[in-house]
């Protein structure tokens, strides 16, 4: 058995060294359509940061208290003023919030948002978030641009150490995806 393993190893090494030659390696020529699409293949990232301040609730949630001690909030609508270093993600966001609050005070959150950039377009956003007592509140948000922002994607991370307060935000816009 050991001799068989050694033979297979030697055979494999032989294939690596002698099975390939430089004359068999070719670089395919790019057609005109491939040359047009080639620059689009590279993603470009534009990083931004800023803050998000709660403006207020537009619609209260429907609240359901479960026998397990979990409190469900559904359909809370709030607005935030997001001030970012990139004008493509700077504006007022309307959020639809759903959350489950657990007996230990932690929660998980999810929902949608719309960030409107006047005279430019908007972002359709989806998110997931969580609050852990003593650690803070985090949202991970993904968005797709509309209007002049069509074709762009973005990701935001909102963090707030001690709610309530002002969120710190970092993110990036992906172009050419």
Image (spheres, rainbow, N blue to C red):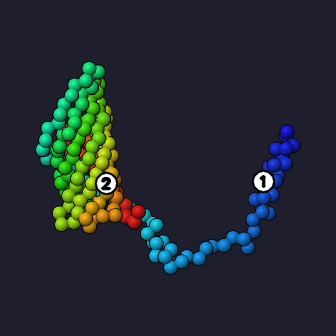
Residue 67 location in percent, x, y? 26, 20
Q: Residue at x 34, y 64 (%)?
A: 151
Disc 1 and disc 2 in contact, CB within 8 angstroms = no
Residue 36 location in percent, x, y? 46, 76
Residue 56 location in percent, x, y? 13, 44
Q: Residue at x 27, y 61 (%)?
A: 146
Tell me the SS state at disc 1. Answer: helix
Q: Work out which quarter of the rendered image holds the N terminus and state it.
A: top right
Q: Which residue is mark 2?
A: 143
Front one among 98 and 52: 98
Q: Is residue 14 above or below residue 139?
A: below
Quarter of the figure with residue 176: bottom left
Q: Is residue 75 above or below residue 89?
A: above
Question: Quick one: label 2, few (<14), some, or many (20+) residues within 10 Å?
Answer: many
Q: Is residue 85 visible?
A: no
Quarter of the figure with residue 165: top left
Q: Residue at x 26, y 30 (%)?
A: 101
**Is residue 46 toward the left or the right of residue 168 in the image?**
right
Q: Earlier in the sequence, mark 1 or mark 2?
A: 1
Quarter of the figure with residue 100: top left
Q: Residue furthest top?
A: 67
Q: Is residue 148 visible?
A: yes
Q: Residue at x 26, y 57 (%)?
A: 123
Q: Which residue is mark 1?
A: 12
Q: Is residue 68 above or below residue 23?
A: above
Front one among 9 and 145: 145
């Amino acid at each position: 058995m050991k001799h068989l393993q050694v033979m297979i190893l030697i055979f494999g090494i032989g294939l690596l060294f002698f099975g390939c030659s430089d004359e068999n390696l070719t670089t395919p020529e790019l057609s005109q359509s491939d040359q047009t699409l080639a620059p689009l293949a590279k993603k470009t990232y534009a990083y931004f940061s800023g803050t998000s301040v709660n403006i207020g609730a537009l619609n209260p949630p429907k609240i359901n208290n479960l026998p397990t001690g979990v409190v469900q909030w559904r359909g809370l609508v709030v607005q935030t003023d997001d001030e970012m270093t990139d004008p493509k993600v700077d504006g007022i966001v309307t959020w639809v919030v759903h959350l489950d609050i657990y007996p230990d005070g932690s929660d998980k959150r999810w929902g949608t948002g719309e960030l409107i950039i006047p005279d430019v377009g908007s972002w359709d956003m989806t998110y997931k978030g969580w609050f852990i007592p003593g650690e803070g509140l985090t949202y991970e948000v993904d968005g797709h641009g509309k209007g002049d922002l069509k074709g762009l994607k973005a990701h935001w991370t909102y963090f707030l150490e001690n709610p309530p307060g002002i969120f710190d935000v970092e993110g990036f816009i992906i172009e050419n995806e």
